[in-house]
């Protein structure tokens, strides 16, 4: 191999190693952000568990209070649920400690998510073409916004509905519901994080429409198939009951319709840009 070839190969190898080094520091900074928030939450376990994780088990939770206010407004007292039986147990020696660690870590991810995605975007953006950067402008804001909306939906809507349903459900009066803390916390985290991820559907549709992989015609044609897939995903992230699955599936179906509108908007803009380019070339 010639000296020039060796130099070119070394430059490529160094460039690749430089990219790896840069990626490593993005990951390190993201990990530090998660750890900082996780430690703060770990040290404030009364707030984490009393005011956040166990809050949906109480009748004075925000969702139940608003539901009761709505019931009083329409004169349906049954919507004021009142206290419902809910007992938690820890059947494993390290159960409470592990759930404390897990809840703190996941909470750190949720809080640090906008920064984490910003770090990821800082690594990806320099490799994009100019037109790709233009179409992805505002990606960090909208991805973070939809994630937060999904988290709030999962926490304030899906979670209390699921908890109330399972806490009050009984096959026989002598059977008592006593839930394990490991199963409870895992269910809460799955519902909340799953909702945050699934709410990224409009963003995914936007980018796929920009690159031409998705069109509103295709989405309308496969609407029925997509709704089936949506409810399957809702069944995966929710407990195995149809009531909670519907509570997740219906809003996601609504997001799918919004995604069709976004795809149509993207297509209209592309056609306008192509028409302008054609007009300029003719002139």
Image (tube, rainbow, N blue to C red):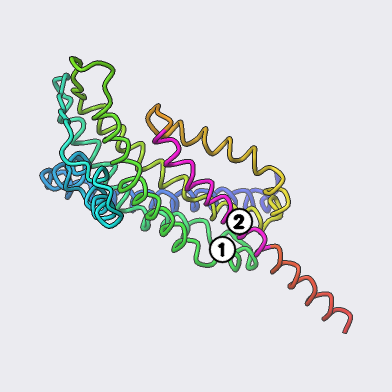
Q: Is residue 7 rendered to the left or right of residue 190?
A: right
Q: Quadrant of residue 227?
A: top right
Neighbour tally class for label 2: few under 14, some 14-19, many 20 plus, Cα within 10 Å: some
Label number found at residue 218: none
- Magenta segment includes 50: no
- Between marks 2 and 1, how big is the CA–CA gap? 8 Å
Q: Is residue 245 rendered to the left or right of residue 97?
A: right
Circles 2, 1 touching at the beta carbon (< 8 Å): yes
Tag 1, which secondary structure?
loop
Q: Is residue 139 visible?
A: yes
Q: Residue at x 18, y 19 (%)?
A: 176
Q: Quadrant of residue 104?
A: top left
As drawn, the residue found furthest toward the front would be 75
**Which secondary structure dominates the residues rendered in magenta?**
helix
**Spot occupied by residue 239 in the image (x, y as percentages of width and height):** 37, 30
Q: Residue at x 16, y 19 (%)?
A: 91
The residue identified by callout 1 is 136
Along the line of sight, the residue nearer the viewer: 18 or 282: 282
Along the line of sight, the residue nearer the viewer: 40 or 202: 202
Q: Residue at x 27, y 57 (%)?
A: 73
Q: Which residues are magenta?
A: 243-266
The residue identified by callout 2 is 207
**Spot occupied by residue 157 in the image (x, y as percentages of width and height):** 34, 46
Q: Is residue 58 rendered to the left or right of residue 137?
A: left
As drawn, the residue found furthest toward the bottom would be 283
Q: Check the picture and name the quadrant holding the N terminus.
A: top right
């Amino acid at each position: 191999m010639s000296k020039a070839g060796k130099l070119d190969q070394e430059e490529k190898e160094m460039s690749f190693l430089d990219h790896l080094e840069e990626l490593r520091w993005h990951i390190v900074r993201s990990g530090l952000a998660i750890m900082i928030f996780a430690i703060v939450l770990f040290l404030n376990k009364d707030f984490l568990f009393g005011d956040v994780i166990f809050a949906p088990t109480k009748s004075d939770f925000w969702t139940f209070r608003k539901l009761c206010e709505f019931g009083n407004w329409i004169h349906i007292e049954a919507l004021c649920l009142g206290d419902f039986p809910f007992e938690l147990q820890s059947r494993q020696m390290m159960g409470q400690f592990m759930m404390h660690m897990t809840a703190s870590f996941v909470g750190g991810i949720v809080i640090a998510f906008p920064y984490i995605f910003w770090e990821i975007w800082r690594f990806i953006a320099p490799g994009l073409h100019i037109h790709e950067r233009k179409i992805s402008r505002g990606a960090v804001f909208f991805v973070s916004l939809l994630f937060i909306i999904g988290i709030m939906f999962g926490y304030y809507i899906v979670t209390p509905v699921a908890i109330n349903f399972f806490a009050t459900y009984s096959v026989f009066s002598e059977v008592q519901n006593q839930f394990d803390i490991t199963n409870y916390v895992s269910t809460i985290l799955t519902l909340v994080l799953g909702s945050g991820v699934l709410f990224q559907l409009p963003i995914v549709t936007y980018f796929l429409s920009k690159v031409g992989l998705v069109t509103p015609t295709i989405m309308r044609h496969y609407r029925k198939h997509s709704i089936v897939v949506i409810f399957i995903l809702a069944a995966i992230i929710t407990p195995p009951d149809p009531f909670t699955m519907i509570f997740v599936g219906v809003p996601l179906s609504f997001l799918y319709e919004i995604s069709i509108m976004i795809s149509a908007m993207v297509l209209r803009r592309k056609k306008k840009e192509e028409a302008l380019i054609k007009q300029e070339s003719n002139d």
